[in-house]
Image (spheres, rainbow, N blue to C red):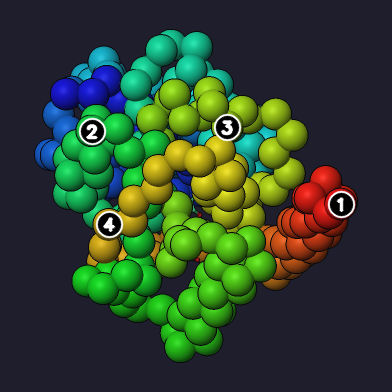
Amino acid sequence: MIRSLVVVPTHNEADNIGRLLNELRAVLPTTDVMVVDDASSDDTRRIVRDLAATDCALRLVERDAKHGLGDAYLHAFGIALAEKYDAVVQLDADLSHDPAMLPMMLDLADRGIALVIGSRYIPGGTVSGWPRRRTWLSRWGNRYVAIMLGLAINDATAGFRVYRTDTLGAIGLDGVQASGYGFQVEMAYRVVRSGLSVVEVPISFTDRVAGASKMGLPIVAEAFWLVTIWGIQDMVSLKRRRRAYRTVDEP
Ligand SMILES: Nc1nc2c(ncn2[C@@H]2O[C@H](COP(=O)(O)OP(=O)(O)OP(=O)(O)O)[C@@H](O)[C@H]2O)c(=O)[nH]1
Ligand SMILES: [Mg+2]
C-alpha cells in the first residue's frame, strides 16, 4: 500500500474531531495522520492530544494564529515532501467527507493518478443538508471555474482529495495565492496545467451538523476574483501564443 499522510486542518472543531479521527482509524488503522490546528480556542487540541497518547501514528501541529485553510495545507505538504511520503490525503474535520472512501481513492493514487478528487458533481455524487442557496453557489461556482479556466473538472472546489507527493513536487508550491476555496481550485489548475492526471470519484457530501462554518463572503470573493484574473490571463496569453504562431507561420 502507498505510504500516505492524512492531513486534517482544524479551527474550533471540538464537536467533530474525535469522531472523525475514530472513523478514520476504523478504515485506515495505521496510516499516519496529522491534525494542523490553527488557534482553536475550544477543546480541539486536548481531544487530539488525548487520542495521540495511545496512537503513535497521530500527531498534532499547533499554530498560534488562524492562517487559513490553504496555508495549513501548504505547511502539511511541506512536511509530507520532507518526510518522503508517497501521497497526501486532504480531509475536512467536520464529518462532511466520509473516510470510508479513502482506500479506493488511495488505490487510484497508488496506480499513478496525480490527483484524486472526491466529487459531489459527477453521477453518483450527492450533497445533503445544504440550503438551496449554498448548493446553487457551489454548483455555479464550479461551472464558472470550469469555463474561465477551461478545466474539465466538475468539482474543483472540493476539499476531499488525494495528491501523490510527486504531483506536489512537479507543480511546485511557491507563489500559491489563494487561501480559501480558491486554494483547492488553484492546486487543481496547477495539476492540469502540468499535464498530470486528475480523476473524480463520486462522494456523498453531508453538511456539518456540529461546529461553526469558517466559510464566508471574503473566501467566496477571493476565489471569484482570483479565478477571474487567472481566466483573463489565460485568454490574453492564448491570444499572444496564437499571434506568435501566425507570425512564424505566415510568409
Ligand atoms: N488549520 C486551519 N483549518 C481551518 C481554517 N479554516 C478552516 N479550517 C478547517 O478546514 C475545514 C473546512 O472548513 P469549513 O468551515 O468546514 O469550511 P467548508 O467545509 O468550506 O464550509 P462548510 O460547508 O460551511 O462546512 C474544517 O476542518 C475547518 O476546521 C484555518 O484557517 N486553519
Ligand atoms: Mg465543511
Asked whether the beta carbons under mark 1 and mark 3 sit within 8 Å of each other, the answer is no
Q: Provide the residue designation for mark 4.
A: 201
Q: Residue at x 53, y 23 (%)?
A: 169
Residue 178 horizontal/vertical position (percent): 69, 48
Depicted 22 relative to depicted 96: above or below: above
- Closest to the camera, between mark 3 and mark 4, is 3
Depicted 142 relative to depicted 136: above or below: above
Crowd rating for badge 2 (residues with CA inside 10 Å; few <14, some 14–19, many 20+): few
The residue type indicated by label 3 comes to Ile
Q: Is mark 3 within 8 Å of ligand 1?
A: no
In front of the other: 39 or 224? 224
Q: Residue at x 14, y 29 (%)?
A: 29
Residue 189 horizontal/vertical position (percent): 58, 49
Q: Secondary structure at mark 1?
A: loop
Q: Provide the residue designation for mark 2.
A: 111
User: N-terminal of the two: label 3 or label 4?
Assistant: 3
Q: Secondary structure at mark 4?
A: strand
Quadrant of residue 35 in the image?
A: top left
Quadrant of residue 34 in the image?
A: top left
User: N-terminal of the two: label 2 or label 3?
Assistant: 2
Q: Provide the residue designation for mark 1.
A: 251
Disc marking residue 171:
3
Residue 118 horizontal/vertical position (percent): 33, 55
In front of the other: 73 or 111? 111
Crowd rating for badge 4 (residues with CA inside 10 Å; few <14, some 14–19, many 20+): some
The residue type indicated by label 2 comes to Arg
The residue type indicated by label 1 comes to Pro
Crowd rating for badge 1 (residues with CA inside 10 Å; few <14, some 14–19, many 20+): few
The residue type indicated by label 4 comes to Val
